[in-house]
Amino acid sequence: MTLVTALGFAQQAIPEVLPHIVQIQSAPVLPSLEVKVTPKKSFGYLRMGVSDSNLQTTDVVMIPGFGLGYRIVSGASAFDISASFNRRETITDEGKERTYLYTVPKANYLYYVDSFYAGAGAAWGGVKTEDTNFVGIIPNISIGYELNQTGVLRSFVQLDVSQPAIAAVKEGALPKPYAELSFGAGF
């Protein structure tokens, strides 16, 4: 009976030997090919453009120029600081006529709506035409369109309208408003 009881209740005990699979994680030797680039919010730029030195007349007098600047972007707002110089020299019957416009520095606040932006600011600058010589504070308004906001190279088209206002040096009449249309490339 003992034997029957022992064998009747006995279980076959065969140990299960399962291999323990351990997942080995290793870092790839080369970095991932998928690199995420976050767009820069702030950028420096070079700007090329033309100005009309006498906006209120029907004669279009274009003056080529260039500028350098830096734009600090935060959300939908931006602070732009720049310098620009536009110059034209013509030879008339009376002699050489030099016209130039410059701003050093020019500070603007800009507000973005998608890729479009608008803003206002002021500059210390000078305007010299055949009728006047002005050095002083020049307020301005700006509107523009930024073409590539998420790329490494950024570009924009901008229209500025400025009116010399507070003179430190003034010879002749106060200069009329002038417009500048420019194309900028940022890096």
Image (spheres, helix red, strand yellow):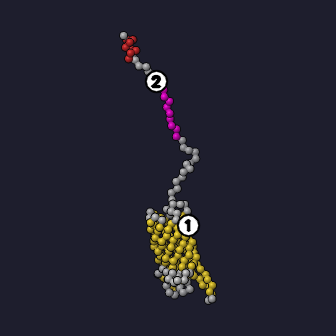
Q: Residue furthest top?
A: 1
Residue 142 x, y percent position in the rendering = 48, 73
Asked if 1 appears above or below 27 in the picture, the reply is above
Quarter of the picture holding the N terminus: top left
Residue 141 x, y percent position in the rendering = 47, 74
Asked if 62 appears above or below 27 in the picture, the reply is below
Image quadrant in which you'd find residue 27: top right
Disc ID at residue 6: none
Q: Is residue 20 visible?
A: yes
* Spatial CA span between label 1 and label 2: 75 Å
Part of the protein shown in magenta: 16-25
**Residue under label 2:** 15
Q: Residues within 10 Å of mark 1 (few under 14, many from 20)?
A: some
**Residue under label 1:** 185
Residue 37 x, y percent position in the rendering = 52, 56
Q: Is residue 22 magenta?
A: yes
What residue is at 50 percent from the left and 35 percent from the top?
22
Three-letter code for the amino acid on which mark 2 is drawn:
Pro
Q: Residue 162 versus residue 128: which sits nearer the camera?
A: 162
Q: Residues within 10 Å of mark 2 (few under 14, many from 20)?
A: few
The prevailing secondary structure element of the residues shown in magenta is loop
**Mark 2 or mark 1, which is nearer the start of the sequence?**
2
What residue is at 50 percent from the left and 66 percent from the top?
146
Image label count: 2
Quarter of the picture holding the C terminus: bottom right
75 on left or right of 86 = left
Three-letter code for the amino acid on which mark 1 is drawn:
Ala
Disc 2 on helix, strand or loop?
Answer: loop
Q: Is residue 44 visible?
A: no
